[in-house]
Image: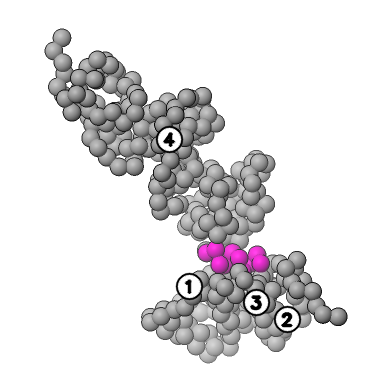
């Protein structure tokens, strides 16, 4: 038998769809058996990614992702941070690629983590559905990281809050089940950053303040972090330590425009909201009282005990 020195065009097209990766089973489907594969590896036509998976050319992380799917078998889907990267929820690909296979595997290569749990998937390479990805990655994220992921998924209308709430109701073992439920509600209400979610949770709701409108304002050309419409008060949250240049000028222009229509603005930064939310709540409550609010703030578990 004369050894093959080429790959059929159909196989090359399949490899192109899989970032250059091919399984031994796919090669055998074109009558290229293991012995011929080894010759092709020796000739440089193919390179070995791992046992049973080969490449037509050296590629990037996506090739390793496809290799993991091919290792896992026909029911495999990418999950957790691997799916989150492909779906744009996180910006960096993970060093270890998570694969849900739906069956038991003994793969010991540290580049992949094969999980025998089953997951529904879609896309190429197949990855968990967006709502499931959000649920999976937030299980190992901090509160702020979770808000960023939720803002990307919900804030851009890529997934419905109700879909996440339904999955949460079925996930009794999620380590941050209650917290994630609260964050889903905050993001669905308009909180688009970790600082906005912290303000809504730790300042406003924890101290019984009126509920502000999110991403709205008295003037159509400006969106505000928190607008207490009934009292003519806006709270703006600056996630950066300070603003310079055009950003600072825009802030001043916005504050001045609001003041001209009788709306006052309070500004708080990350350190104030996260470091002393009780003091922020007291200041907002005082401003609201001056503007007609007849209620009063309540003490939260973090509030200092008043001196007697």
Could you classify mark 3 by the number of other residues whose Cα lies within 10 Å: few (under 14), some (14-19), or many (20 or more)?
A: many
Residue 49 lies left or right of residue 290; in this view the side is: left
The circle drawn on residue 240 is: 1
Do labels 3 and 4 touch, CB within 8 Å? no
Reply above or below: 211 against 233: above
- Of the two numbered discs 2 and 4 in the rendering, the one whose residue sits closer to the viewer: 4
Which quarter of the image is occupied by the C terminus?
bottom right
Q: Circle 4 sits in a helix, a strand or a loop, which is it?
A: loop
Q: Mark 2 highlights which residue? A: 293
Which numbered disc, 1 or 2, marks the residue that appears first in the sequence? 1
Q: Quadrant of residue 15?
A: top left
Where does residue 10 sit, x and y in percent of width and height? 23, 26
Question: Taking 286 as reference, is 220 left or right?
Answer: left
Residue that mark 3 sits on: 280
For mark 4, what is the residue? 110
In front of the other: label 1 or label 4? 4
């Amino acid at each position: 038998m004369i050894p093959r020195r080429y790959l059929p065009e159909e196989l090359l097209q399949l490899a192109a769809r899989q970032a250059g990766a091919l399984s031994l089973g796919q090669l055998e489907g074109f009558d290229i058996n293991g012995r011929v594969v080894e010759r092709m590896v020796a000739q440089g036509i193919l390179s070995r990614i791992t046992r049973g998976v080969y490449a037509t050319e050296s590629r990037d992380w996506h090739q390793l992702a496809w290799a993991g799917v091919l290792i896992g078998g026909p029911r495999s889907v990418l999950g957790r941070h691997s799916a989150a990267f492909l779906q744009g929820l996180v910006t960096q690909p993970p060093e270890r690629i998570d694969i849900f296979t739906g069956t038991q595997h003994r793969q010991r290569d540290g580049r992949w983590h094969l999980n025998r749990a089953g997951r529904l998937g879609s896309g190429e390479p197949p990855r968990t559905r967006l709502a499931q990805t959000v649920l999976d990655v937030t299980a190992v994220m901090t509160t702020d990281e979770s808000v960023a992921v939720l803002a990307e998924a919900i804030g851009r209308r890529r997934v419905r809050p109700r879909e996440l709430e339904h999955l949460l109701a079925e996930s009794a073992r999620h380590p941050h089940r209650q917290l994630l439920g609260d964050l889903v509600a905050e993001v669905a209400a308009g909180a688009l950053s970790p600082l906005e979610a912290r303000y809504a949770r730790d300042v406003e709701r924890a101290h019984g303040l009126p509920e502000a409108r999110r991403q709205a304002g008295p003037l159509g050309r400006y969106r505000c972090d928190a607008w207490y419409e009934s009292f003519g008060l806006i709270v703006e949250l600056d996630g950066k330590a300070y603003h310079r240049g055009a950003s600072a000028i825009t802030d001043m222009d916005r504050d001045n425009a609001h003041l001209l229509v009788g709306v006052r603005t309070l500004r708080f930064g990350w350190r104030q909201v996260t470091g002393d939310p009780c003091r922020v709540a007291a200041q907002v409550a005082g401003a609201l009282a001056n503007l007609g609010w007849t209620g009063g703030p309540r003490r939260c578990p973090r509030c200092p005990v008043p001196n007697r």
